[in-house]
Image: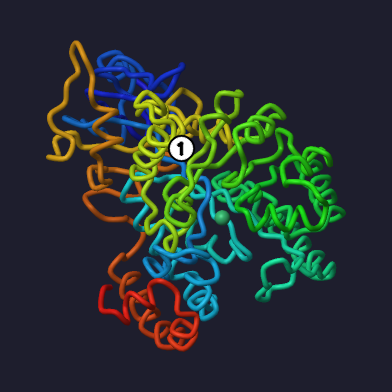
Amino acid sequence: MEKIDLLVSAPHFFTMKGDGVGYCPNSAMAVDRGKILAIGPREEILNLYRANRTIDAEGQAVLPGFIDAHMHMTLCGLRGLAQDTGYWMMYGLAPFSHQMDEATGIMGAQLAVAEAVRAGTTTFGEFGRRPDLLIPFFEKVGVRTQITVTIREAVDRIYNPGELYEFDPARGERMLDACLDIFTRFNGAAEGRITVLFGPQGPDFVSRELLLRIQELARERKAKIHMHTQQGDRETAQMMMRYDKRPIAWLDEINYLDENLIAVHLTDADDHEAQLVARRGAAMTLCSGSIGIIDGVVPPAKAFQEAGGMVALGSDQAPGNNNHNMINEMKLTALFNKIRYQDPEVMPAWRVLRMATIEGARALGLDKRIGSLEADKQADFILVDLRRPSLAPIYTEPMRNIVPNLVYSGRGDEVSLVVVDGRIIYENGRLIHLDESEVVSAVQAAAERLGPKAAEEFWEVNGTNARFMKEGKL
Ligand SMILES: [Zn+2]
């Protein structure tokens, strides 16, 4: 009998193999040196292997860990400060983001990871200027990360409506250099748990010349480009002013829509534009909660999928979405699209679960390693306790309700175990390598310092929430 690291047996496995959720009852999975060795009928697997640790997950389901494809985790310390407002970035976020420092960002990211791991996220797609600063923490906690380094040529300042962004080519060069440096140092690090992408902030923030250089350098390195694309009427207005073209038409003209691009949001894209992006082979990241709250828009992911495109899900950031919980993201994606198309058959539970797992992995180019439970893939998986009141009762024969229960009724606290690369990182209600109470206290202390500093600008901007507070409504 072969001796291995870990054996997991459970009454329900959702492997994501095939076109659906790949349901396998009464199965077991053998894990060794970070990888899935075999998965199959319970007795067969248990007869083949002996393990250092055997988990008999009675009453539980095994699923691939969730992939959160687009996050700005460093903003988590600003949770709940910028919702329910128009001009979110200026009226909601700006008074607070102006007071953010590096230390508060790092603490915020720790809070986001603690929150997300508890709800089953194993892969974190952080997008930011210095995501490398978070790497020691990611390595300590043991999560998988795909970081994107922001490259921006537009000068940071307040622009009036109708004013074209001012480009500073030297700034663009510096940020590209930083991206290349981070790529060289960290892509493939931590036994492959870290991948690095190139992140032009958007076609409105970077000149044509620099965008094309980024494309060439990314291609040479076989890295993807992760870019906010047609993320709002603000971007469309900039592109119309500068090039007299809408963003997607312009990006197509410069051959930017290809299999190397992950297009985030498509907030202001119509169905035809989304389908063009998909037909060119690019992938999409959909942030349903964030774009719903910030813009009141449901992006055209359904049209994108109908054109053959792969769509990943992202939680974006806490001052917009308010949380980093992929179960919530799956539910909102299913609900918002049913409402948008006035059709209950749009985005069924099994489909959004695929978007949080295998379809997301394909969108990000990670599907050779993760996204489904199959031999030779990395052992990134979660256990979900189906005996919790929010998921009970379950039906398995002859009909099945586990996936709809998880998507529409789950809260995240039903996740009982989280494993990345075969290593347990969350069990018995706690993260193994992180003192959560310390993190929460540190972020609370930072919030108490930041709030008073942001007050003057907050009252001066006088956004919706400032008015609600003055009126005693909030
Ligand atoms: Zn973003």
Residue 419 or residue 111, whichever sits in front: 111
Q: Which residue is pictured at 25% across the width and 15% down the height? A: 43
- Which residue is depicted at the point 47% across and 75% down? 104
Where the C terminus falls, by quadrant? bottom left
Q: Quadrant of ligand 1?
A: bottom right
Tell me which amino acid carries mark 1: Gly
Where residue 62 sits in the image (x, y, percent)? Answer: 31, 31
Task: Evaluate whether residue 196 shows in this view.
Answer: no
Where does label 1 land, which residue? 34
Question: Looking at this view, is 45 or 108 the one in front?
Answer: 108
Q: Examine the image and state in which quarter residue 354 appears.
A: top left
Residue 304 position within the rendered picture, expressed as x and y whole percent measured from the top left: 58, 31
Using the rendered view, name the quadrant where residue 284 is placed: top right
Q: Is residue 32 left or right of residue 44?
A: right
Q: Is residue 105 visible?
A: yes
Which SS class for mark 1? loop
Taking the spot 22% from the left edge, 43% from the top edge, the residue there is 414
Quarter containing the N terminus:
top left
